[in-house]
Image: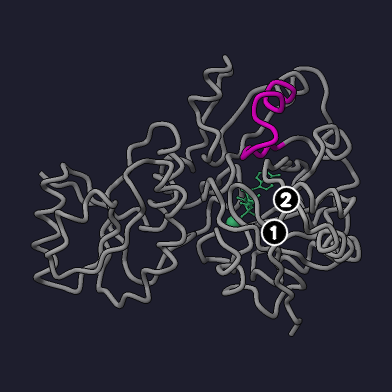
């Protein structure tokens, strides 16, 4: 059992960043905030350090880690970038870095197989969060970091969530407050011929790639549950993520039908609902437990979803209901995560 140190950090925390950077260089584990979710960092050039991440999370070793950098030029140290692929990479980095975009590229030798789960590609991300970049710069090495949750739990969006999952298992947690996006980064792969594929939806949306004039294919794992023998391009997309023990069911229908449905269900079983602030006046008098995702927008839903999913089981309900989100813009990422949490169970009201 490790003693996990927890520090609140801001622009004044030079000494703490220096200490955290040293822990990373020396092979330890430090959890840190990013604009998407909290990451669990280790030196990406050190296979033994990366192994500690899998142990702390209870993560299957075939699920590769994202390599975080603080300087765009560093991508060339860890990935082969030539020809058409280099052109597309430059366009993406120029438009979306630093920010919630991870780019999968052919890997260079220096990145150990432990980090890439034996794949010949490496996933690289330059986060926009100042604390994240400061830590990576202080470490002086690239930082391999999955989300800082125990495997199977929702990704952490506060330091308290990380503490819940990782206390005693890692060296240090840096607390930079709540994450602004709230869902994990968008992942795209860039093939040698420059072809782009979306592997995981996130804060950088399909519409944003299209606005740049880039064509982008979508891996089927983003849009539906995969069948027996089908493999997602991002190995992590195959896992049943974020599912609470309390069954979660997604409901499609008008607001009025949704309220009427909740009213009927609440009379029959211990019912929970994930709703928005705007719904509260309409359901307040029903005998149900509700958790609000904030005011009604994809941004707010993304920001609050994981924190609310962490709270559902403690409510002691037989079932939780939530609306099926719209798939436009950031909605696609919310839709993808909430469907997984619901094990793809949906009801359409007529
Ligand atoms: O927002 C994020 O991306 C956060 C923060 C901490 O940066 N990190 C994160 O990491 O979500 P993780 O490990 O929870 O998810 C990484 C995903 C997994 O689905 C993994 O399979 C995929 O990235 N991945 C990593 N390397 C890959 C590669 N070389 N090819 C395809 N998929 C890859
Ligand atoms: Mg994760």
Q: Residue at x 81, y 63 (%)?
A: 16
Q: CA distance from mark 1 to mark 2?
A: 6 Å
Q: Nearer the viewer, residue 273 or 333?
A: 273
Q: Assess mark 2: CB under 8 A from ligand 1?
A: yes
In the rendered image, is residue 192 in sight?
Answer: yes
Magenta range is: 89-104
Query: Which residue lies at the image location 40% right of the left edge and 67% below the top edge?
Result: 244
Horizontal side of 52 relative to 272 (left or right) equals right
Question: Which residue has dot 2 on it?
Answer: 132
Residue assigned mark 1: 32
- Residue furthest front as drawn: 12
- Up-down relation of residue 94 to residue 226 (above or below): above
Q: Secondary structure at mark 1?
A: strand
Residue 6 in the image: state x and y as whole percent. Answer: 70, 72
Q: Position of residue 91 (x, y in %)?
A: 69, 21
Q: Which residue is depicted at the point 59% across and 69% down?
A: 150
Position of 248 with respect to 41 (left or right) is: left
């Amino acid at each position: 059992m490790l003693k996990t140190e927890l520090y609140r950090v801001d622009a004044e925390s030079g000494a703490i960043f220096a200490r955290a950077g040293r822990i990373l260089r020396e092979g330890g584990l430090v959890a840190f905030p990013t604009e998407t979710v909290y990451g669990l960092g280790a030196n990406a050039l050190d296979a033994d350090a990366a192994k500690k991440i899998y142990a702390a999370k209870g993560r299957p070793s075939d699920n590769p880690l994202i390599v975080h950098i603080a300087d765009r030029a560093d991508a060339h140290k860890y990935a082969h970038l030539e020809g058409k692929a280099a052109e597309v990479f430059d366009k993406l980095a120029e438009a979306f870095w630093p920010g919630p975009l991870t780019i999968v590229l052919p890997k260079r030798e220096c990145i150990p197989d432990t980090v890439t789960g034996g794949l010949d590609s490496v996933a690289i991300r330059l986060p926009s969060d100042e604390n994240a970049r400061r830590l990576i710069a202080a470490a002086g090495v690239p930082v391999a970091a999955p989300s800082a949750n125990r495997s199977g739990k929702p990704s952490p969006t506060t330091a308290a969530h990380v503490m819940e999952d990782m206390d005693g298992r890692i060296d240090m947690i840096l607390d930079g407050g709540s994450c602004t996006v709230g869902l994990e980064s968008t992942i795209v792969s860039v093939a040698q011929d420059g072809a782009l594929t979306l592997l995981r939806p996130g804060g950088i949306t399909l519409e944003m790639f299209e606005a740049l004039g880039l064509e982008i294919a979508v891996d089927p794992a983003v849009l539906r549950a995969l069948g027996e023998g089908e493999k997602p391009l991002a190995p992590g997309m195959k896992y049943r993520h974020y599912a609470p023990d309390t069954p979660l069911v997604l409901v499609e229908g008008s607001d009025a039908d949704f309220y009427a449905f909740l009213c009927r269900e609440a009379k029959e079983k211990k019912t929970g609902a994930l709703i928005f602030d705007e719904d509260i006046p309409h359901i307040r008098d029903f005998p149900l437990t509700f958790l609000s995702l904030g005011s009604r927008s994809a941004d707010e839903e993304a920001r609050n979803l994981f924190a609310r999913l962490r709270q559902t089981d403690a409510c002691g309900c037989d079932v939780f209901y939530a609306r099926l989100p719209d798939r436009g813009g950031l909605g696609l990422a919310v839709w993808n995560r909430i469907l997984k949490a619901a094990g793809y169970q949906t009801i359409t009201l007529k």
